[in-house]
Amino acid sequence: MQRGLTGRFESIAVGGEQVQAFVPASLPPQPPVEMLYERQRLLEKALLACGRLDAITTLLPDPDLFLYAYVRREALLSSQIEGTQSSLSDLLLFELDEAPGVPFDDVVEVSNYVAALEHGIGRLAGGFPLSNRLIREIHAQLLSRGRGTNKQPGEFRTSQNWIGGTRPGNALFVPPPPQEIEPCMAALERFLHDPAAPGALFKAALAHVQFETIHPFLDGNGRVGRLLIALLLHHDGVLRQPLLYLSLYFKQNRSEYYRLLDSVRTTGDWESWLDFFLEGVAQTATGAVDTAHRLLAMFEEDAGHIQDLGRGAANALRVFDALRRRPVASIDHLARRTGVAYPTAARAVDALVRLGVLSELTGRRRGRIFAYDGYLTILNEGAQPL
């Protein structure tokens, strides 16, 4: 269905030139999205995949272990879309106090994203509503350190921004002028809590486009907009744990993602966007379930090899369990986390290196850092810098 422009253009003066800023109409789309048979099937496929992902959390011995890993993978991928060049190992090394020398600017952005996501999860778990206030809190966490600290963290913008180009006059897209941000975001918040709004997956799809179109912050809009999807699905009960992250799908389909966002604004083609989004949900949820099964199988196989170590098996298993929770660590960290003496932890680490479970990252004689290779290999799939 072709609806035409899904908002209005407003002529504004920026930097001595007149530009056309786009102000989106409130959600839901009018007329409503067409629910053809194929789209209904896509919705059912996506919901079924989400159901399987939700069920996997009941099978995991420690769902927080999976959440820890997936939050960091998502932080990396979402930040890569914005141009950072960090790796998962960089992030995990950065989180170790005694691992200096990791590139600061890029990895701190990824670390901030972890903090922002965990803040959102914690607030929702405490009963705080998904709201503009929470969105601003998340943004404040996202820009709390490193690049962006001068871009009004936690505040809707009070100046004009634009997407693409060197100035508003040659930009690919100019979002609403500053005075329209509060009313646009208030309308979006009402939609998020409207009992007559569509189901959670449709709501997340529509809200993501609307947020990216409003572009309410001076920086970090893309990352907050992707976070909003996971938090909304968690908030609306689709997933008990916020484990669905679409950044890899968006990264792998960047051109189509941006084309469809623009098509919604200019032609009202919500249907093509929804089809793309639902396919991404189905693929991503199915991939997450597969990853969980592969991690569990690897943990079981490696634990079996460790049990064959004889007298040192008990301590090696303690260290191994700590590495399942945090796959990059120093011996000192492992000793503290397991409650064993440093020499005992060192012997366990040496045994795990001989088994091929661990490898040393730094090449140093002192202050060595070890990584659970198989774990990182699985999590790194698709997460290499662009």
Image (tube, helix red, strand yellow):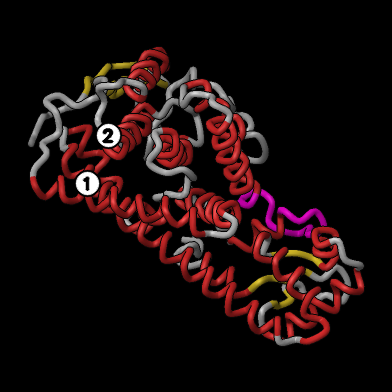
Mark seen at residue 199: 2
Q: Position of residue 193 (x, y in %)?
A: 36, 22
| Neighbours of disc 1 within 10 Å: few (<14), some (14-19), many (20+) | many
Q: In which quarter of the view is residue 143 placed?
A: top right
| Image x and y of residue 151, in percent | 57, 29
Q: Which residue lies at the image location 28% right of the left edge and 47% below the top edge?
A: 277
> Where, by quadrant of the figure, is residue 127 drawn?
top right
Q: Position of residue 101 (x, y in %)?
A: 76, 59
Q: Can the viewer see residue 353 in this picture?
A: yes
In depth, the one of 129 and 210 nearer the eye is 129
At mark 2, the secondary structure is loop
The range drawn in magenta is 95-107
- Residue 237 horizontal side relative to residue 350, left or right: left
Task: From this view, report whether residue 363 is shown above or below residue 130.
Answer: below
The answer, for residue 151, to whether it is visible in the render is no
User: Is residue 322 left or right of 58 when viewed as pictured?
Assistant: right
Question: In the drawing, does residue 194 fall left or right of residue 355?
Answer: left
Residue 43: numbered disc: 1
Q: State yes or no: residue 167 in magenta.
A: no
